[in-house]
Amino acid sequence: MSAPKKIAIIGSGNWGSAIGKIIGKNAAQLDQFETQVNMWVFEEMVDGRKLTEIINNDHENVKYLPGHKLPENIVAIPDVVEACMSADIHVWVLPHQFVRGVCQKLKGNIKPDAIALSLIKGLDESKTGVDLISNVINKELGVEVNVLMGANLAKEVANGHFCETTIGCRNEANGQMLKEMVQADNFRVVVVEDATTVEICGALKNIVATGAGFVDGLGMGDNTKAAVIRLGLMEMVKFTETFYQSLQPGGSKNPQGSQTSTFLESCGIADLVTTCYGGRNRRVAEAFVTSGKTIDELEQEMLNGQKIQGPPTAKEVYHLLTEKKCEDQFPLFVAIHKICYEGMPVKDFIGCLKNHPEHM
Ligand SMILES: NC(=O)C1=CN([C@@H]2O[C@H](COP(=O)(O)OP(=O)(O)OC[C@H]3O[C@@H](n4cnc5c(N)ncnc54)[C@H](O)[C@@H]3O)[C@@H](O)[C@H]2O)C=CC1
Ligand SMILES: O=C(CO)COP(=O)(O)O
């Protein structure tokens, strides 16, 4: 049997801590993984103490997942290079805006044959355009990047309530190994090979959830929200067909293309539903309508350091759509960007739904 694999979790926010509970328990029980799991923690002071010290002594991330004990084999480390240099598996679970900075630090400082699993829902925008987060990590660090996305509100997972998730793998054997690392009695994993679609679903559903929050803020009912979910799903499918149908990381052709069935996995329709009803994006977007405050103000006031991904992802997608001159095919995504950042009145969102190309 090959040597046990060392795991490093890159990130320790709400989801990073919840998945840390499961990974820590599995690593302690399964021979194929080293028992100690490193967790890179972006150091900050909480009530006069370092967050790393709190996690290592009290085994609780009191800031991002209060009320839950982390397994004692999860070791918080404030230096990301120290946390990752000996790891065989990197679990990326950060707000997407911090990925490039962390890649710069890790470049040249990791095992060349390490593999990654990204739980990050979002897209990257740089001078060269918009890209998948897995592609950025792959290009920057040269590692294989698999993805995990699903209907997984962190607090519910941490509470042990039953849910499903989807791993999109680049390699079947690694997909199975990663499944063993994260699967639990109440956290059931389906592995598919369509990693690109899995990741796009995770990124785009946060935009749709922002729209769901708008209609909640406007006092519309569940029928309106169902329309937002359906039209949002149609735009997610169209976006995938338009921009990613035949591309894999590195630009080579994907002979299978995007599979429509992937939208029926937990990463697709299920994550859309849960985020449009129970997520942070929905909550902040509803308050945006009712309070008149900006998205940034509300994120700071309501989330205690947690980040929402929907509005920034809408902005990144908007830039891609304008560059490719196809805004008219994605009116819901475009309106959500304009409402968040360009002063478009939120009541005009309903007009955009009424005149959606799906109804023409
Ligand atoms: N929270 C949830 O229910 C779920 C979140 N996700 C996704 O997982 C990813 C991570 O989300 P969460 O763990 O919830 O994070 P979060 O929203 O709790 O964000 C806080 C994290 O950001 C870190 N941070 C703050 N400033 C930083 C900096 N300058 N550099 C690096 N890190 C910094 C903090 O240390 C903390 O770990 C996101 O893409 C999110 O969409 C996916 C499924 C569920
Ligand atoms: O991705 C999530 C659930 O699967 C979390 O969504 P929010 O970021 O909107 O809370």
Image (cartoon, rainbow, N blue to C red):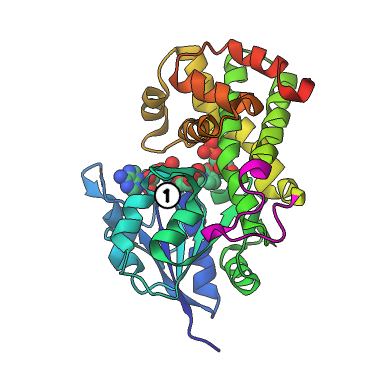
Q: Which class describes the residues within 10 Å of circle 1: few (<14), some (14-19), or many (20+)?
A: many
- Choose between 89 and 104: the one closer to the eye: 104
Residue 27 pos. (x, y %): 50, 71
Residue 237 left/right relative to 301: right
- Most frequent secondary structure within the magenta stretch: loop
* Quadrant containing the N terminus in the rendered view: bottom right
Residue 250 left/right relative to 53: right
- At 65% across and 55% down in the image, what residue appears? 166
Residue 197 appears anywhere in the view = yes
- At 35% across and 57% down in the image, what residue appears? 103
Residue 248 pos. (x, y %): 59, 58
Q: Quadrant of ligand 1?
A: top left
Residue position for label 1 = 94
Amino acid type for the residue under numbered disc 1:
Leu
- At 71% across and 19% down in the image, what residue appears? 224
Residue 257 in the magenta stretch? The answer is yes
Residue 24 pos. (x, y %): 48, 65
Residue 67 appears anywhere in the view = no
Query: What's drawn in magenta, residue-wise?
Result: 240-259
Residue 316 left/right relative to 229: left
Q: In the figure, residue 291 lies in which quadrant?
A: top left
The residue lying furthest to the bottom in this view is 1
Residue 7 in the magenta stretch? The answer is no
Secondary structure state at the residue bearing disc 1: loop
Q: In the figure, residue 63 lies in which quadrant?
A: top left
- At 37% across and 23% down in the image, what residue appears? 297
Residue 78 pos. (x, y %): 27, 58
* Quadrant containing the C terminus in the rendered view: top right
Residue 13 left/right relative to 206: left
